[in-house]
Amino acid sequence: MDRKEQELGADLWFPLPVLLYLLTLQMLTRSPAAPISPAEPIRQAYSLALYMQKNTSTLLQTYLEYQGSPFSDPGFSAPELQLSSLPPAAVSFKTWHALEDGERLGRAQEAFLALTQHLQLVGDDQIDLNPDSPILLAQLGGARLRSQGLLGNMAAIMTALGLPIPPEEDTLGLVPFEASAFERKCRGYIVTREYGHWTDRAVRDLALLKAKYPI
Amino acid sequence: MDMYFTSRRPLWMVDSKIMKARSDFQWLFSSVLLLYLMNQVNSQKKGVPHDLTCTTSNLNLWDCSWKAPSGHGARYEVCIDNRFICYQLAKTNMKIPALARGDHEITINAQHDFRSSTSKFTLNEENVSLIPDTPEILNLSAEFSTSTLHIKWNDKGSIFPHHSNAIWQIKILRKKRMEIVTIVTHNTTLNGKDTVHEWSWTSDIPLECVTHFVSIRCYIEDLHFSGHKEWSRWSPVKNISWSSGSQPKVFPQDKVILVGSNITFCCVIQEQVLSALIGNEQCPLIHLDGENVAIKIYNISISQSSGTNVVFTTDNNMVGTVVFAGYPPDSPQELSCETHDLKEIICTWNPGRVTGLLGPRNTSYTLHESFSGKKTAFKRTDEPTNESYQLLFQLIPNQEIYNFTLNAQNPLGQSEATILVNITQRVYPHTPTSFKVKDTNSTAVTLSWDLLGSFAKINLLCQIEINKSNSEQELRNITVEGLENSTYLVTLDKLNPYTNYTFRIRCASETFWKWSNWTIEKQHLTIEAIPSKGPDTWREWSSDGKNLIIYWKPLPINEANGRILSYNVSCSLDEKTQSLSEIPDRQHKAEIQLDKNDYIISVVAKNSAGSSPPSKIPSMEIPNDDLKIEKAVGVGRGISLTWNYDPNMTCDYVIKWCNSSGPRPCLMDWKKVPSNRTEAVIESDEFQPGVRYHFFLYGCRNRGYQLLRSVIGYIEELAPIVAPNFTVEDTSADSIIVKWEDIPVEELRGFLRGYLFYFGKGERGTSKMRGLESGPSDVKVKNITDLSQKTLRIADLQGKTSYHLVLRAYTSGGIGPEKSMYVVTKENSVGLIIAILIPVAVAVIVGVVTSILCYRKREWIKETFYPDIPNPENCKALQFQKSVCEGSSALKTLEMNPCTPNNVEVLETRSTVPKIEDTEIISPVAQHPEDGSEAEPENHVVVSYCPPIIEEEIANPAVDEAGGTSQVIYIDVQSMYQPQAKPEEEQESDSGGGSGYKPQMHLPITSPVEDLTADDDLDKTTGYRPQANVNTWNLVSPDSPRSTDSNSEIVSFGSPCSINSRQFLIPPKDEDSPKSSGGGWSFTNFFQNKPND
């Protein structure tokens, strides 16, 4: 927990939701003995997820716009492209609904952890491919930071619910660095697409939790 | 085989020796051989060896073979050159050392089954073929990234006895079907040693996508060999293929190519490719081995930042690659190097054409200095902009000349630009800092500033901008010795004391390259100095003559040299000086009680730095009796005064002036003029047009001022603003005496030039005088230029007439407003009497004479103006009128319905009274007095009137007659209006004959008995019957009689019924009517007029 706090504190230019989260996190860590209600962190995580949801399509759109045709063609979609290092967000409703809170949060956390690292990778790729596009780079950076923020929020919820926080995994270690430019573009597309899907899923996850733990 | 080779050489050597020994027997041998050959030819037909052919692959050994009948155990003895060398062989080929040039006899003796047959051949080198050994590809390798094949092979040159050229053909094949892509020729030289050759070939299709095969053959071109040369056989093919994984891939990957070039992309894939796109353009597929496909792109265009995508799509996948099409770097343009501080050189350039390549493919720049051998690389910032291409290069101690080469490189190529600079001549200093100003004295300051940089070896040129308030900007250049990061000091002199200055500074090297930026501005007020002059002084005696008032003007700022604190006024008489108290600033006059002695007054101005030199003025005024007041008018904004040179005037002239209407002592301002001048232009902002000023010119002689001239003047003359006040002194029947007053000087606004006096007939309230100036009317003007004249007598006027008098004053500035007055002249009684009497007398005389003349000549008048008119009764032409009037109602006169007054008149007079006028008018009536009673003609006459509504009468002629009697009933005072009945009534009256005048409304009171006469009446009444008094008509219109004669309706027509009727109805001369009816119609008129005469 302390390590995570330091890690997050390093990024001083967090957007507002992330700052809010940090404040909450600070309060939570300072009084570990006090009984913690999960409602507040759920609410914060939920509002952050909603905020993220508003930007996901813009991010994907901006990303595709900078990759050239056919990526930038209107209506571009390549669902067949997948990344093995990213867990897919698609899940059957039945399975999803039957998930335990801990498992649900755990999967989301796992996904956002992978997304955070992948967004960093995509950002690096785009520095090579589109060095003159500060807008795209800023949006990718923003998405990464928000994912980190959401990760923190989820950790807080899990703490509040008394669930074990899954260990951080280095998913990026599996990513092929020697990818061609085309593979990088595709990879970026998958990451930004999955970021949107996972954000949508996170909103639903948190909405469910929010209903379960009202303030 | 090897064995044969070993025995061959000794034999060859023996053979040559024997040949020499037996040369003597050659002739004999030849003849025997010829016989032998003849036998051989015969024996060939029986299956002897034949078709000897020889080839060589290395020029040393010949490989000969022949054909022979097959059979086991056959042995051959081959002898060369008449058994010089012989070989025993069991096969039909052999290798022999290369023979010398020329023909050689080969004898082959075949022994088979105890039979022998011999064949002879002649062998020459020319018949031998050179076929090199089949070459072998030692190594075939591929560089997939560049799609290049590398082929290595050995030329085996060691087996050839001498140098010769080798030609190699390399065949490239592609696909499993081995389609030939190309055959390339490659030349080498064989140099007697085995050499491995290497050759590369770049494929247009990436090597990964399709298997490539290579084969090679050669051809030796040996100049020493005269035989036939042939290509070797093709070497065995070698192939290159790419072992792909199961993942589909597209090649080439991430390739950077030049814009406009052609490129082929291919896809290694296991499933069927449906389409291929470059960007968003579809491309036709080229099918390769398996499912692999390729596309070819021609003339590729420049890529966007992230490259151009090439995508192959299958049913459920998409694979692709990115190609970066761009340009090699342009030569760096406008490369320029300079230094700010002689520590670091900054080189800047413009990259030129955009390469279209970014990120790791972007152009890298390296700056290399050739003398020192040092270099530095350009580091791209996070946000590169085209303008910020610059590199820093550390200055090398003791090196002034630098030869820079800027190298630009990207994956497509490189370019460079060079510049040779003497860095001491490329100094663009930083902006000086810590700029300060310090006082040195009242006219000098010290400027100091810091300048970073190692300028110890050069001089600096600095420019100081000096701004003085309300003054022009001044620039001063100074040169200072350069220092090492130090403060520079400069003294700036020739400044004015107590003046606010603004300074700023910039610097450059003495060998000028560029100015630095200006420092920020520094304001500085220089310190005070003593006033440079005493104040400008004047004195006036007070009006009572007891006190002397001393005036002085404040010193201008450039003479005050500081803030004036006070003034000291002192007066001295014969070395005795009496000082008055200090007078603070702001007060610029002092009053001293003095006697009439000749004092010298001196005034001194003081500021914090000290006192000014005194300005002195004598108190005495030298009288001048010969003085007259002159006039002057200004030119422009001032007044010019001139005077004659007077050598007596030793000091200066003073012109003082004041508003002439101001209080005394009169002083507005003064001006001093040097004694050598004879003119002065007085200008002042206080001068106003139209105000009279008084100017006094004083000359200074010895110890006193003397008034030389006194001038009144205007800066600009204006028109008077008031009119002169004037009154009428006296009035007679034909003259007026006017008197006026002067206009006050303030309202005159100029020198009076005269008056304008206007007079003319006119009464109050009329606007006649408006056109005083313009109208040429009867307004008279008198210009009075004699200014002393104050009265004016206006003569030759009409009596009892209103006159309008106007007086205006004028100056050179214009004419003033007018003052006007109305005066009525007195009546002239004599004239009036005469005016009445004369017309009366004339009128009487004319009347009398006329009467006499008329009386005497009355017969002639009558004949002339009223001749007898023939009786129309006698005129045959008029008789048709009767029938016309009977048949047609058109002959009836106009009926006017609303003639109500008629009714009244008719009732009163019945048949007698109203007819008189009618009879007079209608000429036929006048002839009928004899025909019947007096009443009858009246009846006839009336009938002639025809109402205007004719149509109704025409419609019912019978009814008219029938209703004739009944109409009588309508004659009633009360029946005022019967529009429908009226025409019938008239018809009635026509038929029954009228008795005298019958109003048109209700004529027929006459009995039906009178119908008999009606016909006659009709005859008569067909003529016109006017209803009006014809007499009056005649007076007005002499044409009327003729009109009536013509019987036309037009005559009755015009006269409205009511008027005519009134004339008829109130006839004043009823008694005359019978007489008149007897006379003609025109005559009657005349007759009626006559009594008036």
Image (spheres, rainbow, N blue to C red):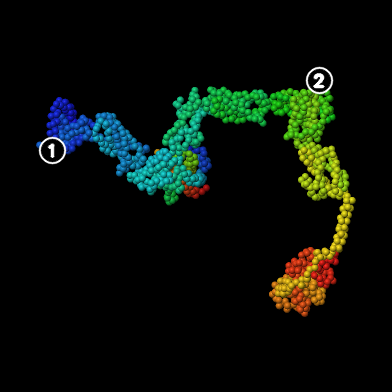
User: Closest to the observer: B25 or B561?
Assistant: B25
Image position, residue B8 (x, y; %):
18, 30
Tell which subunit mark 1 falls on. Answer: B
- Residue sitting at x 57%, y 30%: B517
Tell which subunit mark 2 falls on. Answer: B
**Type of residue at label 2?**
Asp
Q: Quadrant of the C terminus of chain B?
A: bottom right
Alpha-carbon neighbours of circle 1 within 10 Å: few (<14), some, or many (≥20)? few
Residue highlighted by disc 1: B42
**Which numbered marker is on residue B625?**
none
- Label 1's element? helix
Q: Quadrant of residue B296?
A: top left
Q: Earlier in the sequence, mark 2 or mark 1?
A: 1
Q: Is residue B1005 above or below residue B205?
A: below
Camera-near label (2 vs 1) is: 1
Q: Quadrant of the N terminus of chain B?
A: top left
- Residue sitting at x 45%, y 41%: B304
Q: Do we see residue B849 in this rendering?
A: yes
Measure the alpha-carbon separation of dots 2 and 1.
Answer: 179 Å
Alpha-carbon neighbours of circle 2 within 10 Å: few (<14), some, or many (≥20)? few
Residue highlighted by disc 2: B574
Image position, residue B488 (x, y; %):
58, 24
Q: Is residue B585 left or right of residue B831?
A: left
